[in-house]
Every structure is written in structure tokens, then in C-alpha cells.
Amino acid sequence: MNSERENLVIIEILKRGYRKIFDENWPLWLGGLLISIMSIITFAWARPWGVAGGLRNWGDWFFSLLSIYQTKPPSPLISTNSILTLGLLWGALGSALLSKQFAIRMAPPLELLKGVVGGILMGIGAAMAGGCNVGGFYSAISALSFSGLAMMVGLIAGAYVGLRYLYWELEHLPSRSVGATPSEKKEGGFKWLNAEPYIGTLLLIAAIICAWIYSQHAYTRVGVLLLCGLAFGIIIQRTRFCFVRGFRDPFMTGQGEATRAVAISVVVSMLGFAALKWTGLRPESISVVQASWFGGLVGGLLFGIGMVVAGGCGSGCVWRAGEGQIKLMLAVICFSLSTSLFKTLIRTSKGFADLMGHRIFLPDYLTYKWTVIVILFIMTIYYLAATWNEETDRFTVEI
Amino acid sequence: MVDNITPDETLDCRGLSCPMPLLKTKKAIGKMKSGQIIEVLGTDPGTKNDLPGFAKKSGHEYLGDKDDQGFTRFFLKVR
């Protein structure tokens, strides 16, 4: 075989790989599994995965620039919260470009308003629950904090209430279409869509260079967290992994696929976290937030309503904003501002902070062994209930 | 395959994002007769996963989709 032909074979293999990753759909369960693996790696490397903390940091930073806050927040460039969320946005944008799925997508006025209201509700809910669906639910349950389970109940109830609102809206306030997406409409001239994969590749390479620059300035921890965020963004964009669907779909269409993916993901991540904490490799108090139970439950309820109305949760808003959806960009902005303000309110008022509840680390009450068994049991029930509902439509709400 | 389909109803969901295209489709299908075809126009990439999944779950037949200028046409046959 001559070298020219060998090169052609290599190019063909690379093309196949590209299509496999950025053209074909990945199954949801794979998304859940990959997210749980990344969640454990991120915790082992530095800290648990979160999204709302990053949005809050951006909100804090904005208000301190306006001199509304007296104290300066950590710089968004070195805050681990901010870097993880930035990585998520960066990865989702790069992945959307590589998949030719990026486009600035305008939405009708009512949808934009829902982005704003949903974002505000999520911001308040996340401040109360000590995190969004990621930090307050996913990572909190993984970290064996009771608040995560309280938020789970709130999220399920909130998703139901939010869906009821959407049904009401369908009957009374029909949203109108805004027509085709303008950026893809042009005929002739520069084919923007064909250039997207190249821009996406450059963006991902730029992220790796940024991580390298961080490590050159003795911020290796932060640099690798940027790459972790990037991986979350790519995985979530490619699998369209959606926590909202996990909570909403059983009520909306009766589908249980997303719920099962969330349950599997939480279990694997929890086992990894339990191993890291149980063996003393990571402090037990990490991600055990002061939100058990009122903050978790009521914060989860508000967050659940907000995420269904906005059409994206903490991670969902960020990655869909990375795809160019204006409604979700508005949700991200309103989320970051409202969560910053509400968290400040909770921090500065002792009464408010006490109302949110206590820090409850489940192994303190149940031992590690029983905590793991109880969470496994709850997630198995959740998994089975979603599958049972898929067959019976017992919980499905008809329009 | 979807080129020669003449839909009975067309639902314009362009600009709407998840879950609105799916909910509107679900509602529109409720008013249609068995065997009729609905065409859904959408711009949200998520719809390419949502509609086939919904069709599979609810027993409607997903006939396929076709990219147009800046949006996608989806075709479903009512159960």
C-alpha cells in the first residue's frame, strides 16, 4: 500500500469518527453514564460539578461592577464555580458548531417572557436549595446530602405544576411562530453552516490552549476544571441530556427514557462520591448544603416550575444558550441575576438562612452502608415507576 | 421518502423550543382523524429526537423529516 492511499484511509477513518460523534444521535442512557463518570472525575480532581454557582458568580460580579455589592466576588476567571459553567457553555457551543446545529434562534415574545420568568424562578429556587438541578439535586444526592432528596421531591412537584401551566397556556395563550431561522436562510454567498465545524474545532482547541495557559500560571486545578466543564458541555449537547425531561416527560408524554437515564446517572455518580468520602479521600462536608429540608423542597418546587416554563434547567439553559437560542440566553441572564440577589438576601438575613434548614449528611444518621442502600432503593423505585408509567400512563396528564 | 407526502394539517412551530413543538403536536393530533398526516415545521434541534420518541410511545407513525431553508419539516401519521 503506498503512502498516498494510507493517508486516504486515515482521512476516511477520521471522517467516520466525526460522523459518529457529531452527526449521529447518542442514546440518552449513554449521556447519563458519561455524565456520572465526568461527575466523579471532577470531584476526584477538585470539587463536585455545579452550574448555578457559576451563574451566581457572574451575577455577583455584575452587581459589584455596578457598586450594588460592596464586597468583590472571586474573579470569574479563577472561580471554580464560574470556570465549570463557562466550560459547559464553551463545550456546548463548540459541539453545536461541530454538529452544524448552531444558529441564532429568535423566539416569539411570549416565549421570551417565559425565559425571563423561568430564569428568575430557577435563580430563586437554586439559591434556596443550595444549587440548581446539578448542584442542589444531582451532586447533592451524590454527596449523600439529604437536601438533594428534598429537592428531588420539590422538582417532581414543580415539573407537574409547570406542565399544568403549559397546558393552560396552550388553551388560552397560543404562541405564534416567528418563521425560519435567518442565519441559515441565505442562498448563495458564504455558506455559514459549512464553516461551523471548522469554527467549532478551533473553539475546542482554544479551550485546551486556555487550560494549558492556566497550568503555566499555577492554576492547573482551574485549567483542568475548564476541560471538565467542556466535556460536560459536549456530552450534554450531543446526547441532548435533559434533566427537565427526566422530571417532566412522565407527566407530559409518559416517556420514561430520560427519567431512567437520570436515575442511572445519579446512582453511578453517588457510588463514586461515596467511595471518595467513605475512604476519607475527600472531606465529608463537601456539597452538604444548608437546605434540609425546607430550602431543598421549596427551592426545588420553584426551580421545577421555572425549568419547565423556561424549557431548560441549570445545565439545560446553559447548553441551549450555547446552541444560539435567545429564549434560553435570557433565562441564563435572569437566572444569574436573581440567584445572586436571592443568595445575598439569604446570607445577610439570619432568619432567612435558618429557615432554609440544616446541613444533613445522611451517613451521620444512617451510616455509609445504609445511606448507599437507601439512595439505591429510591433511585430504583424512581426508575421502575417511570417504566411502569410508560406502560400504564397512570401519571400522564392529557391535554 | 417524505418528498411526496401531502399533509392534511400543517403546524408551524418555528422559533419555539422544547417542549412547545411537541405539546402543540400532541394537541393538534388530538383533533385529527386516524390515518391523517400532520406536518410540523420546526427550528429546534431537539425536535428531531422528541417527535420520533413521542410517536413511538403514543403509537403514531413517524414518517420522517426533511431539512428546508432554515427549518425542518416533520411528518407524522395519526394512529
Image (cartoon, rainbow, N blue to C red):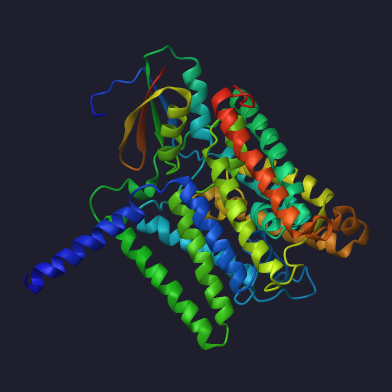
**Residue A266 at x, y percent in the picture:** 61, 52
**Residue A346 at x, y percent in the picture:** 84, 59
Seen at 43% across and 78% down, the residue is A209
**Residue A61 at x, y percent in the picture:** 68, 70
Q: Quadrant of residue A3?
A: bottom left
| A260, A65: nearer the viewer | A260
* Residue most extreme to the front: A369
Seen at 16% across and 64% down, the residue is A9
Dividing the image into 4 quarters, which one contains the C terminus of chain A? Answer: top right
State whether residue A65 is above or below residue A192: below
* Residue most extreme to the right: A351
Please indicate whether residue A260 sits to the left or right of residue A360 in the image.
left
* Residue most extreme to the top: B33
Tell me, yes or no, if residue A340 can be seen here: yes
* Residue most extreme to the bottom: A217
Tell me, yes or no, if residue A117 can be seen here: no
| A139, A375: nearer the viewer | A375
Dividing the image into 4 quarters, which one contains the N terminus of chain A? Answer: bottom left
Please indicate whether residue A33 sits to the left or right of residue A12 in the image.
right
Q: How many marks?
A: 0
Seen at 72% across and 73% down, the residue is A73
Seen at 60% across and 22% down, the residue is A398
State whether residue A63 is above or below residue A176: below
| A274, A135: nearer the viewer | A274
Please indicate whether residue A67 sits to the left or right of residue A38 in the image.
right
